Image (cartoon, rainbow, N blue to C red):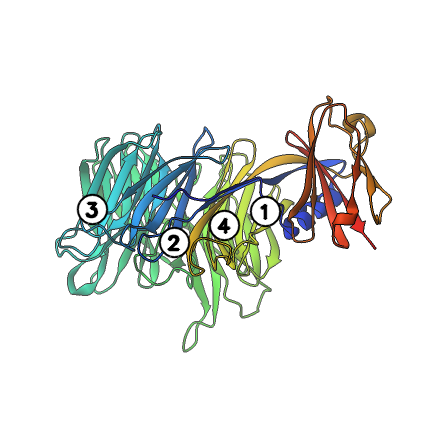
Amino acid sequence: MKHPWHFPQQALPLSMLACLAATMAQAQPSAIVPTLEWTYLIADADTVFNRSQDQVRALYVDGDGTAYLTGATTGSRYNPVFFVTAVESAGQMRWQNRYAGPRNNGAASAATSSMGEGVIVTGSTRGEGTESDFTTASYTATGETRWIARYNSPDDYFDHALAVIPNGFGAYVTGFGSAEQFHKEAITIAYDGNGYPMWTHRLGIPGTDVVGMALAASGEGGIVLAARSSLSTLVARYAGGGVLRWATPVDGYPGDLFRRYNIGSNLYGFDVLALSQDRYPAVVSTTCSEEGPSCLNYDVQVTLLGDDGSIRWTRQHDSSTPGARVHDLAVAVATDRSGGIYTLSYGSALSLARFELDGRQNWRQTFEAGCQARGLFVDPDGEAYVLAKCGTREALVAKVSAAGALSWQIRYADERFGTFSPEAFSVSGGEDVWIAGNVSDFPDSSPLRRDSEGIVLVKFAPAVISAAQPAHEIGEPLRVWPNPARSEAQVSAGYFGTPASRTLTLYDVMGRSVWSRVLTASEREVRLRTETFAPGAYTLVLRQAREIRSTGIVVAR
């Protein structure tokens, strides 16, 4: 395996600098906003064509700040294989483990979840004499393989695992497998701590397809399954031992209808199911609100079911202008510890809504037109984080308070590649934000072919952004004069709290670092020779630990 590229302390993209500046203007007197800490690129070339084919499917970050990425990576014979990579909080790869399956090839889809010390992943790989099998693997925190379990349907045809959750000693896995007459059935398996299947259940409907998409633990050894049939969402509850208690159809397609409609090996985890405070299942789906020769308008629907499978209430909402024929697509649902239910969707804009257990809508925050929602994370206190894809190369992360107010939003665009598609994210510790995405269209300077595909992991750490910070908090303000500057400028750089070493960095309009200097605790004045820089606008950033302050500077001739 070739070592992946590592780019620590990457330059702040222009879009992110502009966003931070907007946040600073609103801060009174300061705000805590994530700032870019490092990026990490995984791009392993195959041995035949020197072409990378790495794709991330899921991301999990444990309590120690170790990120686990799973998906498909290039095999030694130009075939993608199942992989899991652990990256430490400081941005160094800890280990990578691969599993090719008996036939040493096969596109893998994977999801991640914690299981004590380490990680458990699931997906699919090709078997000996079979097309594809459920493949579930458990790894220790140091990368050793605990066990690998496979499942193959009786007809040796396609089986794809899509979601996994821990069960305290092993794992529950769901996905779909082939059934009679080329139809699909939802398959759910419970594994013990040694990877032995304790029970397996197949859920099918004659004449149609059923695909297991999401799982949630319901207590006393039971689980709730969200599945998709050909025309609806199906919610099922299993008691301990795999006994099916009930299965209830709910109108609508779960998940992003157009992005995830085709069933194949490229599917991966869905956030369409959550359990409320009272362990009632809540599901989000996309439903047709105006019929025609085909559906003319899709709306977002959230449904809360009771412990007995009955539907307690259903609410529909339009994430776009009411009455407008814009397809609104449901993406994710989550809950907080007070019982609040959050739904994420997008149409003409991103939309995040909160509902009470009785079905009342508390608030809805609509923002950022033209972006596609990708993921939702809600902490126990109701602070919500949203991931979205904007255009072909930008990721957006926004924080919405428990009261429904937009706290901050940041954008990340990786200028090194022609495309960047964020696929998963996580929030850990004190608001550390992690984004995992796929990149393509490699630069000419890359040792790999231009049509390579790679994975970028990005970490943001919280920083105090000061708009009008009092002098006693920063020793001296960050000042630049003259401004505009021609041949040189004088910089006055204070400190945050206790005098300490700081770093001054100058960024151009593309977010690239063009100059940097580490200051000792006693240094206050710096001469910046601007005659070596091209005329234009720049941003000067002062960092001390996790504190940050910035100011603009113009270079003129």
Q: Which residue was labeled with disc 2?
A: 52
Please give the label number shown on residue 398: 1
At label 1, the amino acid type is Ala
Q: Position of residue 232 (x, y in %)?
A: 34, 60
Q: CA distance from mark 4 to mark 3?
A: 29 Å
Q: CA distance from mark 3 to mark 1?
A: 39 Å
Q: Which residue was labeled with disc 4?
A: 343
Q: Residue furthest front?
A: 532
Is 486 left or right of 47, judged from the image as shown? right
Q: Which residue was labeled with disc 3?
A: 201
Q: CA distance from mark 2 to mark 1?
A: 31 Å
At label 4, the amino acid type is Thr
Task: For mark 2, give the secondary structure.
Answer: loop
At label 2, the amino acid type is Ser
Task: For mark 3, give the secondary structure.
Answer: strand
Near-viewer residue (85 or 292)? 85
Q: Position of residue 553 (x, y in %)?
A: 79, 47
Task: For mark 1, give the secondary structure.
Answer: strand
Q: Position of residue 472 (x, y in %)?
A: 81, 25
Mark 3 or 1: in front is: 1
Name the N-terminal-most of marks 2 and 3: 2
Name the N-terminal-most of marks 3 and 1: 3
Say few, some or many: other residues with alpha carbon within 10 Å of mark 2 (under 14 / 14 to 19 / 20 or more). many
Please give the label number shown on residue 88: none
Name the N-terminal-most of marks 1 and 4: 4
Q: CA distance from mark 2 to mark 3?
A: 38 Å
Cβ atoms at labels 4 and 2 below 8 Å apart: no
Q: Residue furthest bottom?
A: 293
**Above/below status of 209 relative to 376:** below
Is 108 left or right of 60, judged from the image as shown? left
Say few, some or many: other residues with alpha carbon within 10 Å of mark 4 (under 14 / 14 to 19 / 20 or more). many
Going 34% across and 37% down the picture, which residue do you hit?
218
